[in-house]
Image (cartoon, rainbow, N blue to C red):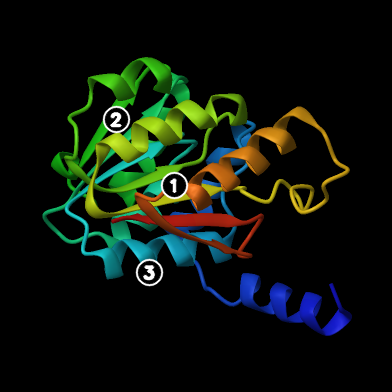
Amino acid sequence: MSADKSTSWSYAEDLPAEDEVMLRARERSFELGVTPIGRGVGAVLTVLAASSKAQTAVEIGTGAGVSGVCLLRGLGPQSVLTTIDVDVEHLKAAREAFAEAGSPANRTRTISGRAGDVLPRLTDAAYDLVFIDADKPGLPGYVDQAIRLLKSRGLLIINDALDKDRVANPANRDATTVVLRQVGKTIRDDERLAATMLPTGDGLLVAVKK
């Protein structure tokens, strides 16, 4: 990356402003040892959620609620976010963040459990948006389930899709990198999807179900 390109990337990442609700959610993330999404990714999630006009959304990997708040701020007032995390403390922190953001309790559904166990119980073609920010070994299965869950024109978003710039280097064979590289190719080649990679944060892989 050229110096100018790197400067532009940093500028774009730091441009979105955040309020006290987001700052407190970030503090809880760090206290729990969770790495929250960056400001740039959060802003993109809000814009994508708003532009998709999604009524139903699923988040795989709740964390402490930073990404959930960003999604809720883009979703319409009648929309519902279902968020899944294996750690009950994460879900508790997320519910606190949602409440501080002024989101009514009936707009969120927090589910404790392994995503691989929870996702098969959700209804086919019932969701407008699926955001994945979870363990990378499980990603292929999560993507399969996400495609099943999405309605036509539904939006799939995968965080950390460039794996700290390692995915672009074919010589890098770390297990996580290999999974992300394969998932990217699988989504690219899936005729049911139209996909692109955004360089925001550590990479956002975005696809629309045709």
Between the residue at mark 1 and the residue at mark 2, the CA separation in whole angstroms equals 30 Å
User: Which residue is denoted by mark 3 in the rendering?
Assistant: 47
Q: Residues within 10 Å of mark 1 (few under 14, many from 20)?
A: few
Please state the horizontal and vertical placement of residue 207, each as a whole percent of the image. 42, 55
Q: Secondary structure at mark 1?
A: loop
x, y percentage for residue 190?
44, 47
Residue for point 42% across, 60% down: 45
Q: Position of residue 26 (x, y in %)?
A: 55, 48
Q: Can you tell which mark lies on residue 110?
A: 2
The reply to whether callout 1 and callout 2 are in contact (CB within 8 Å) is no
Identify the residue under disc 1: 190
Q: For numbered disc 3, what is the local secondary structure?
A: helix
Q: Earlier in the sequence, mark 2 or mark 3?
A: 3
Local secondary structure at mark 2: strand
**Residue 113 visible from this viewpoint:** yes
**Residue 162 as seen in the image, left or right of residue 77:** right
Viewer-proximal residue among 183 and 135: 183
Quadrant for the N terminus, please.
Answer: bottom right
